[in-house]
Image (cartoon, helix red, strand yellow):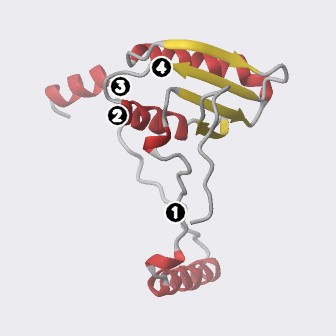
């Protein structure tokens, strides 16, 4: 190993990738494995784009008016999750006006001061909250204000 490569590896804490595979060694198991692999390939080739389910984002960017209401999977994590969201929001330059948790801890609410570009803010918030595994779901909602009701058109 060259001196530069060793220095680079030690600095970044890199390790060489082991060349191990989890393939069966028994010929019968290997044949069954190959058969399953062929079935999977055929299934993947027969799928079309319409067969795939995509995540549905229920929050439109134009719905954002500063309020975010979220529901947790586990209420025991309520304080920790609220603290994480608050720290992230402050790092990103959001000003928190109001922060509440329900008595059960299952529902949380943040009300942020709207900035100059609400669409960009809503994108940032939606991207951050959507990737949090602790949240069951969230919605853009300002409490104590009437929400837009969709009528029959």
Q: Distance between the residues labelled 2 and 4?
A: 16 Å
State the image quarter where residue 86 is shown: top right
Q: Are marks 2 and 4 in contact (CB under 8 Å)?
A: no
Q: Name the disc covering residue 120, or none.
A: 2
Q: Nearer the viewer, mark 1 or mark 3?
A: 1
Image quarter where the N terminus lies is top left
Instruction: Quickly name the residue at label 3.
Output: 13
Q: Earlier in the sequence, mark 2 or mark 4?
A: 4
x, y percent for residue 12: 30, 24
State the image quarter where residue 151 is shown: bottom right
State the image quarter where residue 106 is shown: top right
Q: Distance between the residues labelled 1 and 3?
A: 37 Å
Q: Name the disc covering residue 150, or none.
A: none
Q: Earlier in the sequence, mark 1 or mark 3?
A: 3
Q: Are marks 4 and 1 in contact (CB under 8 Å)?
A: no
x, y percent for residue 137: 65, 42
Instruction: Quickly name the residue at label 4.
Output: 88
The residue tagged with tag 3: helix, strand or loop? loop
């Amino acid at each position: 190993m060259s001196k530069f490569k060793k220095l680079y590896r030690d600095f970044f804490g890199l390790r060489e990738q082991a060349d191990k595979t989890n393939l069966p060694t028994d010929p019968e198991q290997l044949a069954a494995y190959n058969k399953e692999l062929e079935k999977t390939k055929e299934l993947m080739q027969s799928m079309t784009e319409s067969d795939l389910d995509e995540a549905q984002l229920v929050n439109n960017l134009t719905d954002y008016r500063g309020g975010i209401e979220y529901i947790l999977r586990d209420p025991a994590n309520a304080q920790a999750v609220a603290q994480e969201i608050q720290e992230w929001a402050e790092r990103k330059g959001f000003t928190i006006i109001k922060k509440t948790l329900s008595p059960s801890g299952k529902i949380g609410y943040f009300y942020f001061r709207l900035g100059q570009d609400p669409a960009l803010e809503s994108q940032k918030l939606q991207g951050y909250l959507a990737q949090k595994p602790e949240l069951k779901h969230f919605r853009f909602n300002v409490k104590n204000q009437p929400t837009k009701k969709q009528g029959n058109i």
